[in-house]
Image: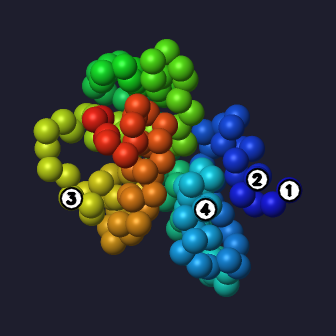
Amino acid sequence: MGGLETCRAIRSDSDVAVIMLTVRNTDNDKVEALDAGADDYVTKPFSAPELLARIRAALRRTPLAPFIGPQRITLEDVEIDFQTRRVAMGGRQARLTPKEFELLRHLVTHPNQVITHRELLQSVWGVEYGDEVEYLRVFVNQLRKKIERDPSNPNIC
């Protein structure tokens, strides 16, 4: 089984953070891995300190404390349960990656506010991020496919 299939298999059963380590470094490879559910993508060669920093960042983004705020929000026919980290569209479960869920959480808990790319990246991915706008494009696209009736004409995100 290849890395992408492994990532998809992990993602189908778990919300654990996934960091892809690979020699493949084209933009298409990175986009495919992120679309498959990876939370981060590191190309070889890499240094041990860099890998450890990325692991620490992934662990920082893992919620440790209960979410303070609304426990459930309904937007049109999308229900978001922050307690169980579940999202349903029209009664059908939408399987979101941890990053997709955190991105959605940040967007819906800041309604009618302008949020810069940098702020969104740092809130969801960590303070060392800010210029990786492609991450946002990929994740917002994936999120729209999962929770919008018509992803090409979004109403929610």
Indicate the position of residue 86 as horizontal and vertical percent values: 50, 25
33 in relation to 139, above or below: below
Looking at the rendering, which quadrant does residue 11 occupy?
Answer: top right
Mark 3 and mark 2 lie on one chain; the one further toward the N terminus is: 2
The answer to whether mark 1 and mark 2 are in CB contact below 8 A is yes
Give the numbered dot on residue 32.
4
The residues bearing labels 3 and 4 have C-alpha atoms spaced at a distance of: 25 Å
Indicate the position of residue 33 as horizontal and vertical percent values: 62, 61
3 in relation to 48, above or below: above
The residues bearing labels 2 and 4 have C-alpha atoms spaced at a distance of: 11 Å
User: Is 48 on the left or on the right of 97, as rendered?
Assistant: right
Report the residue marked by disc 3. 116
Report the residue marked by disc 2. 5
Mark 3 and mark 1 lie on one chain; the one further toward the N terminus is: 1
Circle 4: residue type: Glu
Looking at the rendering, which quadrant does residue 25 occupy?
Answer: bottom right
The answer to whether mark 3 and mark 1 are in CB contact below 8 A is no
Task: Residue at the far top: name it.
Answer: 91
Circle 1: residue type: Met
Give the numbered dot on residue 1.
1
> Can residue 99 be seen here?
no
